């Protein structure tokens, strides 16, 4: 329930500040981001986590 509210609020905020064509189609709310030893976010692992969660949702 809370995730839905957050996604709606983010969408409305983006519409007000960004152009319609720049607004993300989907928001992924996560508790933590995958990070490496240096503490930087690892985007390739993030893509894997998102793909895995979408596959489980279908």
Image (cartoon, helix red, strand yellow):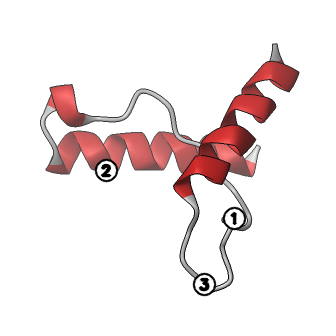
Secondary-structure class at tag 2:
helix
Left or right: 36, with 10 as reference point: right
Placement of 7 over or under 42, stated as above or below? above
Of residue 44 and residue 3, the one placed in the foreground of this image is 44
Gap between marks 3 and 1 measured at Cα: 9 Å
Task: Give me the residue at 66% from left, 51% from top.
Answer: 45
Q: Which residue is labeled 1 in the image?
A: 34
Q: Which residue is labeled 3 in the image?
A: 39
The image quadrant of residue 36 is bottom right
Task: Give me the residue at 54% from left, 77% from top.
Answer: 40
Upstream in the sequence, badge 3 or badge 2? Answer: 2
Upstream in the sequence, badge 3 or badge 1? Answer: 1
Q: Position of residue 19 (x, y in %)?
A: 12, 36
Secondary-structure class at tag 3:
loop
Placement of 24 over or under 37, stated as above or below? above
Q: Quadrant of the C terminus?
A: top right
Placement of 4 over or under 42, stated as above or below? above
Gap between marks 1 and 2 measured at Cα: 26 Å
Task: Give me the residue at 60% from left, 84% from top.
Answer: 39
């Amino acid at each position: 329930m809370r995730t839905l509210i957050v996604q709606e609020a983010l969408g409305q905020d983006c519409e007000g500040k960004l152009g319609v064509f720049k607004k993300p189609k989907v928001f992924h709310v996560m508790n933590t981001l995958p990070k490496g030893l240096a503490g930087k976010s690892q985007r390739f692992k993030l893509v894997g986590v998102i793909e895995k969660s979408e596959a489980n949702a279908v």
